[in-house]
Amino acid sequence: MQIKCTKCQKVIEIAAGKLPKDKEKAMVKCPACQQVLVFNIPASLRQVVENSEKTIVDFGNKKNLRPRLVQLSNSTEYLLKTGKNIIGRDAGISIPGDRYISHKHCMIEVMEQFGEIQCIITDDGSISEKGEPSTNGTFYNDQRLTRYDKLFLNNEDKIRIGHTDFIFKTE
């Protein structure tokens, strides 16, 4: 199966064996620009799976799978939970002391996808009252996220929120 990246237009080949058989949609990260692409799986490549059990992700028992942000200036660690993590001065993950961080600045979603833990960062305005991205921006490896970016995080990625620098860690 082939899909085209909506951001960089790269054609991505996906082996049918890598697609989930019990889902209608799937996600893949563009290897060129890191854009998260959500696409429909053709019915011919799907099958109904009966009595399937949902896997529950428990980071506490998996020492090597503890996604977190580590603040560079003081080594403070902010653990990320499964689901949506809102980051800001007045949010689920509260970062004090930087007036350039919005009250609800950005979001990191932690989920299990294709048998692996996936973390996606976005600053698309979906968490603000006005529907606008943060004023001072969110930076991923020194590139500012646009309102259309949803990027997979990898161990040791650099993230800047306001004037505060972080390293994303999973190990």
Image (tube, rainbow, N blue to C red):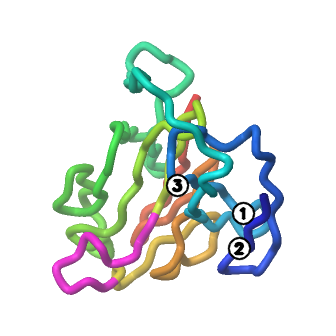
Query: In the displayed structure, would residue 21 be above or below residue 143?
Result: above
Question: Which amino acid does the dot numbered 1 rest on?
Answer: Cys
Place of residue 117 in the rendered image (x, y in percent of width and height, measured from the top left): 53, 36
Q: Which residues are magenta?
A: 122-132
Instruction: Left or right? Give the position of 81 relative to 75.
Output: left
Which mark is drawn over residue 49? none
- Residue named by callout 3: 25
- Residue 17 lies in the magenta-colored region: no
Which of pointers 2 and 3 lies earlier in the amino acid sequence? Answer: 2
- Of the residues shown, which amino acid type is indicated by label 3? Lys
Identify the image quadrant of the N terminus: bottom right
| Circles 1 and 2 in contact, beta carbons < 8 Å | yes
Say which residue label 1 marks. 30
Give the Cα separation between the discs numbered 1 and 3. 16 Å
Q: Residues under labels 2 and 3: Cα distance? A: 16 Å
Question: Amino acid under label 2?
Answer: Cys
* Whether residue 40 is situated above or below residue 101 in the rendered picture: above
For residue 5, which numbered disc appears in the image? Answer: 2
Task: Please say if the residues under marks 1 and 3 sit with CB atoms less than 8 Å apart.
Answer: no
State which mark lies toward you, 1 or 3.
3
